[in-house]
Amino acid sequence: MEEILKEAQQKMEKALEHMKHEFGKVRTGRANPQILEGVMVDYYGTPTSIMQVGNVSVPDSQMIVITPWEKKMLSEIEKAILRADLGMTPQNDGNVVRLPVPPLTEDRRKEMVKQIKKIAEDAKVGIRSVRRDSNERLKKKEKDKVLSQDDVKTGEARIQKLTDEKVVQVDKLTGQKESELMAV
């Protein structure tokens, strides 16, 4: 039973970590290098993450600066950012690519909040499916006469408590991200 509970906790933590990772990709009006994570640059015919062709830094809250390892990658980085349609226009000065982060409009903020709520709901669904799978495993152990009915009830209660804790964490993180988004 402890093994099932431990495994359930690990899977629920993974769902939370995935949600945090997805939240990091959502633009909040502040410069965050994570928004470039999915941007792929054509590096000598190989699609390569922008993070691997240069140094990405954030000198202030409204600017991301990409300094490529090779100068000839400047135009490729610029093209990749435009193709990624991040809602930002890169500026190439011959040495670095500057990416000014425009302030978010009220409508865009509301759109982002909807996106965040969807990510949070996906995380909750993941957590609940872990609960369901764990409960089914407990019932199977009972059917195989490995666990008693009382042990299964205790296990289900502990899994439910764990699920409730993780859902509260999801709600808390969602609230934080939402207030960060709505702050002007």
Image: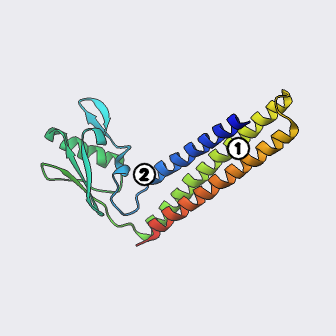
Residue beneath the point at 48% across and 60% down: 112
**Residue ID at (45%, 66%):** 180
Q: Quadrant of the N terminus?
A: top right
Q: Residues within 10 Å of mark 2 (few under 14, many from 20)?
A: some
The residue at the far bottom in this view is 184
Name the spot of residue 40 as percent of width and height, x first: 33, 39
Total count of labels? 2
**Mark toward the viewer: 1 or 2:** 1
Which residue in the protein does label 1 denote?
131
Q: Is residue 74 left or right of residue 164?
A: left
Figure check: 95 above or below 42: below
Q: Secondary structure at mark 1?
A: helix
Q: What residue is disc 2 on?
A: 25
Q: In the rendered image, which quarter is residue 77 located in?
A: top left
Q: Is residue 120 left or right of residue 102?
A: right
Q: Secondary structure at mark 2?
A: helix
Amino acid type, callout 2: Lys
Q: Quadrant of residue 98?
A: bottom left
Is tag 1's residue or tag 2's residue first in the polypeptide sequence? 2
Residue 149: quarter of image: top right
Q: Position of residue 9 (x, y in %)?
A: 63, 43
Q: CA distance from mark 1 to mark 2?
A: 27 Å
